[in-house]
Image (tube, rainbow, N blue to C red):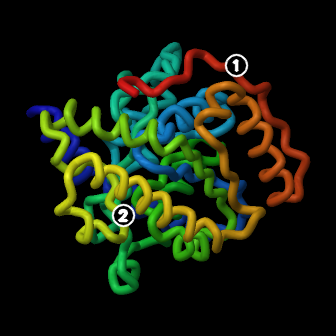
Amino acid sequence: MNELDIISELGLRLESVQESINSEIKNTTAKSLPNVYIVGCPRSGTTALLQYLSSTNYWCYPSNLITRFSKSVYIGSLVQQLIDNNETITFESTYGRSHGLLNTNEFFHFFRRFFPNDDIRHLSDEELQLVDTDKIAMEISSICKAFDKPFVSKALMMQANLAHFSRLMPNDIWLYISREQGDIERSIFKARLDEYGDASVWWSAKPSNYLDILHLEANEQISMQVEGVTRDIENGLAMVPESNKLEVSYENFIKKPEEVYLELQKKYIALSGRDIKFPSPPSNSGIKIKGK
């Protein structure tokens, strides 16, 4: 069997185990620590931010290994802990894709199981009713159970409807990273060329006005893409309580990443009402966006 066949077979055989764990979690009354969900425009530093926070060892995170168990993430999390853990996160990626089993993953194979769409975009009220948010939360809780840690991940599938998802996930923290618009636009233009060989072909997140800007020339379309995605995120973020959100800029993050870590500590202590002990923050180890 090839890799995709093996992943499919694992999912088929292990999905019932995940359902059993979900039932256990559904019946528990224990209060867990907040999870952190990263949102932001494409090419704004979401992967670098995820890699940095994952490297602190305070959070568990979606790895390239766990994503291969997307229908049985609890088992994948247990298997990961059996592997020699000498591999380190390299703070490098190519358009969100990292290398190495234990490096970070965007976790689309997991999230798309619960959404009616595959693309990153705004969902209508009718479509939002089809998203199984309760099951997403249960299965992420199973990852936390396996590692005995809170979870950090990108949440790109949710970011255009933050007001909705933050209401359904009231104990979690939404971490928004922004970047200078011109830098994002140039990086998206390059990504389109690298990925498709044609800057006119759409790449990554779609704003709520996607259909209105499809006809535009590439540079103007990319500018409107960035403005639209930013507007969708920020409009939703405005509806999230201050206690449950944190905003950072990419420019400040790459200079002083430990400040993000320290600000998240404050959020955790305030939300949990506990004096939580965090590991010392790692230093900036060459955080960058490849191909920027």
The N terminus sits in image quarter: top left
Left or right of 265, for residue 52: left
Residue type pointed to by label 2: Pro
- Residue 207 appears in which quarter of the rendering? bottom left
Q: Between 216 and 280, which is closer to the camera in this rendering?
A: 216
Q: Nearer the viewer, residue 44 or 26?
A: 44
- The image shows residue 266, relative to residue 237, as above or below, that is above
* Residue 76 in sight here: no
Left or right of residue 30, residue 70 in this image: left
Q: Which of pointers 1 and 2 lies earlier in the amino acid sequence?
A: 2
Residue 245's x, y, as percent? 69, 58
Determine the residue positioned at 75% across, 45% down: 264
Toward the top, the furthest residue is: 86
The residue located at (85%, 57%) in the rendering is 270
Judged left or right of residue 2, residue 188 is right
Q: Residues within 10 Å of mark 2 (few under 14, many from 20)?
A: many
The residue tagged 2 is 207
Label 1 residue SS:
loop
The answer to whether residue 18 shows anywhere in this view is: yes
Q: What residue sits 26% from the left and 70% below the top?
A: 212
Amino acid found under the numbered disc labelled 1: Ser
| Residue that lies at the very extreme toward the left in this rendered image | 1
Q: Position of residue 71 (x, y in %)?
A: 33, 53
Looking at the image, residue 38 lies above or below residue 31? above
Q: Which is more foreground, mark 1 or mark 2?
A: 2
Q: Could you say which quadrant of the image residue 141 lies in?
A: bottom right
Q: Quadrant of residue 149?
A: top right
Q: What residue did someone put label 1 on?
A: 283
Mark 1, Cα crowd under 10 Å, few <14 / some 14-19 / many 20+, is few
**Looking at the picture, does residue 199 appear above or below residue 161?**
above
Q: Secondary structure at mark 2?
A: loop
**Gap between marks 1 and 2, in whole Å?**
35 Å
